[in-house]
């Protein structure tokens, strides 16, 4: 395969493709218009946002799209995005590796690649509330923002002013030696004591080279004018490094005690959901709590990934393409699938990926492949419409989820899947496959819900 740099040189259009579904064809196929492929995606559209009215919800947008309140200073091309996503996925799956004696080894670095994250939300921090644009990540636990004072040598440039804790009436550093600080230390986020040993220090290093250190603190977190979370524990960052760009911080949605869902479990039961928009020019939502009526959801059991409480795991049992079930032994999926909103592609064990790729290519045989772009990419130049096969994923409990066509299956005219490694090894459900679905993480109930057409 060509290097990511070479791929970037070859690419002319470095944006996320958008399609218009014209209608369903026979036998599990959808006829798609390609007209929007050649139109600029510079207009923000929020008309499809439909958050549930009975929960605390905030808008969610793509980091590089026109709806983003803090757009990146540089445009990210397709190959660069995939390179970062692959690095993130590889790192997450290395977080817990089984040794010969069956024990689990935890690598020293504790995060994943921050610069691969793609979706941001706006929150209010402090009293009075100060708007913060933060990256959303189900693969991280500790939330943090850059704090004042912090000069350009220790903090990266961001669009918004740095959060100033001295101007908030509700800010309080967590004391060193407190129960909260001891929990932070046991969860491997601790960094000893700071400020003459009086305050609890934190430190997180990410797989992509980014890092953040500062003071573990309490503050008021505002999700909506009438929804304020008191004593939210977060990192007030005074020293950041690595490839960071524009955003104010990070919101951790993992399963460890430091995450937002766990901290708010008394009020919201540890449940949360989000909907990722179909294209980067659209908007979705992030919501805390489970809806009072879940009749529109399909549920599959959800567990933790081995001894890593951060990650959420489900069991894939089958795949269909164009309405036809692929012949894949169930043992291929025994490693489970991590649900990750920060990775772009879905990564399948070797056998499953090869079966999917073969079936998809056969169904798309009428269109020329682009051999120098990525594994399975197409040249749709000259076509007004293309016929794309439906792809469905079946999970334990007999739950079958039809992916959005084409935006949940194709990314920049490429199949949004890759291989994760040997059979039985853990895989990953990336964010492209999750588009337009409301993903409900019912942690207390031990299940993951899917609701189609939510944004």
Image (tube, grey):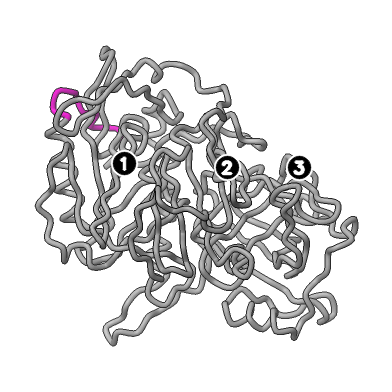
Asked if residue 82 shows in the view, the reply is no
* Closer to the eye: label 3 or 2: 2
Is the magenta region chiefly helix, strand or loop? Answer: loop
- Residue 439's place in the image compared with 252, above or below, is above
Q: Are the residues tagged 1 and 3 within 8 Å (C-beta)?
A: no
Please give the label number shown on residue 191: none
Question: Which residue is drawn at the image coordinates 71% and 43% (left, top)?
Answer: 158
Quadrant housing the N terminus: top left
SS of the residue under disc 3? loop
Please give the label number shown on residue 60: 2
Please give the range of residues in magenta. Answer: 364-373
Q: Are the residues tagged 3 and 2 within 8 Å (C-beta)?
A: no
Query: Where's residue 10, x and y in %?
Result: 36, 28
Instruction: Give the Cα separation between the discs numbered 1 and 2.
Output: 20 Å
SS of the residue under disc 2? strand
Residue under pointer 3: 160
Q: Nearer the viewer, residue 399 or 380?
A: 399
Residue under pointer 1: 403
Instruction: Give the Cα separation between the discs numbered 1 and 3.
Output: 36 Å
Q: Residues within 10 Å of mark 1 (few under 14, many from 20)?
A: many
Q: Which is nearer the N-term, disc 1 or disc 2?
A: 2
- Residue 45's place in the image compared with 71, above or below, is above
């Amino acid at each position: 395969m060509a290097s990511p740099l070479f791929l970037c040189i070859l690419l002319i259009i470095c944006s996320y493709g958008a399609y218009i579904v014209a209608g369903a064809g026979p036998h599990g196929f959808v006829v798609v218009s390609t007209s929007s492929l050649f139109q600029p995606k510079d207009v923000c559209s929020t008309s499809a946002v439909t958050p549930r009215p009975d929960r605390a919800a905030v808008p969610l947008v793509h980091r590089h799209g026109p709806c983003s309140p803090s757009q990146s200073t540089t445009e990210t091309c397709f190959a660069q995005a995939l390179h970062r996503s692959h690095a993130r996925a590889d790192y997450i799956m290395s977080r817990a590796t089984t040794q010969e004696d069956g024990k689990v080894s935890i690598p020293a670095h504790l995060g994943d690649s921050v610069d691969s994250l793609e979706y941001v939300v706006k929150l209010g921090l402090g009293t009075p509330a100060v708007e913060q644009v933060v990256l959303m990540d189900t693969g991280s636990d500790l939330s943090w923002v850059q704090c004042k004072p912090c000069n350009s040598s220790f903090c990266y440039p961001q669009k918004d002013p740095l959060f100033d804790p001295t101007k908030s009436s509700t800010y309080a550093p967590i004391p060193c030696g407190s129960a909260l600080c001891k929990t932070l230390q046991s969860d491997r986020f601790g960094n000893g004591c700071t400020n003459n040993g009086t305050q609890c220090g934190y430190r997180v290093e990410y797989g992509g080279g980014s890092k953040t250190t500062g003071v573990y603190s309490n503050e008021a977190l505002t999700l909506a004018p009438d929804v304020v979370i008191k004593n939210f524990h977060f990192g007030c960052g005074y020293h950041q490094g690595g490839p960071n760009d524009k955003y104010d911080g990070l919101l951790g949605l993992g399963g460890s005690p430091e995450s937002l869902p766990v901290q708010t479990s008394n009020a919201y039961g540890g449940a949360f959901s989000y909907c990722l928009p179909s294209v980067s020019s659209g908007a979705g939502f992030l919501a805390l709590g489970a809806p009072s009526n879940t009749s529109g959801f399909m549920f599959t059991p959800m567990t933790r990934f081995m001894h890593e409480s951060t990650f959420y795991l489900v069991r894939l049992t089958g795949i269909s393409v164009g309405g036809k079930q692929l012949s894949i032994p169930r043992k291929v999926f025994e490693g489970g699938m991590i649900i990750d909103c920060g990775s772009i592609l879905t990564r399948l064990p070797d056998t499953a990926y090869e079966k999917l790729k073969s079936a998809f290519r056969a169904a798309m045989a009428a269109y020329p492949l682009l051999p120098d772009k990525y594994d399975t990419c197409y040249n749709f130049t000259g076509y007004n419409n293309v016929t794309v096969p439906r792809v469905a994923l079946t999970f334990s409990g007999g739950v079958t989820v039809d992916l959005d066509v084409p935006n949940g299956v194709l990314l920049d005219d490429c199949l949004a899947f890759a291989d994760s490694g040997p059979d039985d090894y853990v895989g990953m459900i990336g964010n492209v496959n999750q588009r337009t679905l409301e993903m409900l993480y019912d942690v207390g109930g031990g299940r993951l819900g899917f609701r189609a057409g939510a944004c």
